Amino acid sequence: MPIVQIDMIEGRTEEQKRSLARNITDAVVESVSCKPEVVKVIIRELKKEHYAEGGVLYKDR
Amino acid sequence: MPIVQIDMIEGRTEEQKRSLARNITDAVVESVSCKPEVVKVIIRELKKEHYAEGGVLYKDR
Amino acid sequence: MPIVQIDMIEGRTEEQKRSLARNITDAVVESVSCKPEVVKVIIRELKKEHYAEGGVLYKDR
Amino acid sequence: MPIVQIDMIEGRTEEQKRSLARNITDAVVESVSCKPEVVKVIIRELKKEHYAEGGVLYKDR
Amino acid sequence: MPIVQIDMIEGRTEEQKRSLARNITDAVVESVSCKPEVVKVIIRELKKEHYAEGGVLYKDR
Amino acid sequence: MPIVQIDMIEGRTEEQKRSLARNITDAVVESVSCKPEVVKVIIRELKKEHYAEGGVLYKDR
């Protein structure tokens, strides 16, 4: 704890995910003064047909 | 905001997902009087071996 | 199943939540042809200090 | 209700998931005295590049 | 990891939550052969006006 | 999108939440090259009796 869950559209590289996990962890540690090792980060990738804004699938934009 | 997350068993067509996103957005707009473009919809598809009711996997029903 | 989770800023009336649950259920039934009784709806209310867009808390907008 | 969501690293067998659903349901029934059939269990499998502890992807450990 | 999130209607005693956390952890350990200390359990309590089945709020049942 | 959900034990100050939202948004923007305004951050505070590690409630540690 803290546990961070990130939903984002699929397609990022493994390196982007690596830096996302590191940067998010640093951001949490800096903001709430906890140790890095207690921060858990979950990345959930979404297909473009599984996310919509304004009622329109991302795939149809 | 609002952000809507829907968990459902995999197997629906893309057209069903399209109408799900549109209909859910309309339902939220009608109920809480917000603008359509602020409504986000996330669809999460589950394999039948990843959902259980009464302790029994959907796959085994 | 399907299970719908809605995150929204606190402050809506009970009647708005009642119609949100009903309208969301109807939207799901219409879109994916399931029975109403299998649709579960969870409403999560968020304080304005617990939601941010563009790095700015809703409370500070 | 109750609805249980479990995030875990991918790789478990179908039999492990079967017993996870059964054991979790029994645990909930025993703890909060509800009927088994009202307990829903969702299993979410994560790739090793989608989970991090201490800022390090599970894949890089 | 594994991380377990449980949504349930508010009203259970602290002792029921204590046993829920213990029993859920035991169930996960037994099913997927992990160590107890890696299992995280999050309990989310819902007001009866924040959960619906079949389009009807739990509060109105 | 991306949408970030953070679960943490209650008790942080409003200023800590303000900086958490800002720092998390910066971290996402830097890692996956998206615009700040598309990043949504949800903070969920947990009571100590609603989080457990190793089967023990945080309240009992």
Image (spheres, coloured by chain):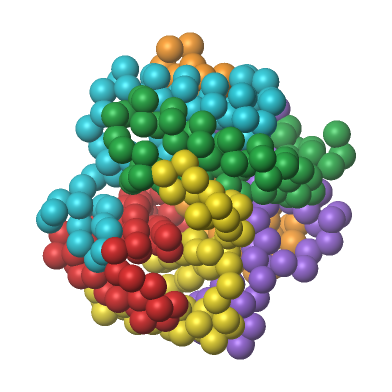
Chain colours: A green, B purple, C orange, D yellow, E red, F cyan
Q: Position of residue D32 (x, y in %)?
A: 26, 71
Q: Residue at x 27, y 53 (%)?
A: F51
Q: Residue furthest front?
A: D61
Q: How many circles with numbers are drawn on the protein? A: 0
Q: Is residue A30 left or right of residue F41?
A: left
Above or below B13: residue D27: below
Residue C40 horizontal/vertical position (percent): 53, 60
Q: Is residue F51 left or right of residue B10?
A: left
State which quadrant residue C13 falls in: top left
The spot of residue E53 in percent (x, y) is: 50, 62
Describe residue A54's horizontal placement relative to residue F7 as left or right.
Answer: right
Can residue C23 be seen at all in this image of the molecule?
no
Comparing F26 with D20, the one in front is F26
- Residue at horizontal 22 percent and vertical 32 percent from the top: F11
From this view, report whether residue C20 is shown above or below residue E15: above
Q: Residue at x 51, y 31 (%)?
A: A23
Q: State the residue at coordinates (58%, 67%).
A: D10
Estimate the x, y position of residue A58 in percent, counting from the top left: 79, 39
Q: Residue furthest top?
A: C61
For residue C25, what is the image quadrant?
bottom right
- Can residue F2 be seen in the rendering of this structure? yes
Residue in front for this viewpoint, A54 or D9 = D9
The N terminus of chain C - image quarter: bottom right
Question: For this rendering, which residue is in front, A7 or C57?
Answer: A7
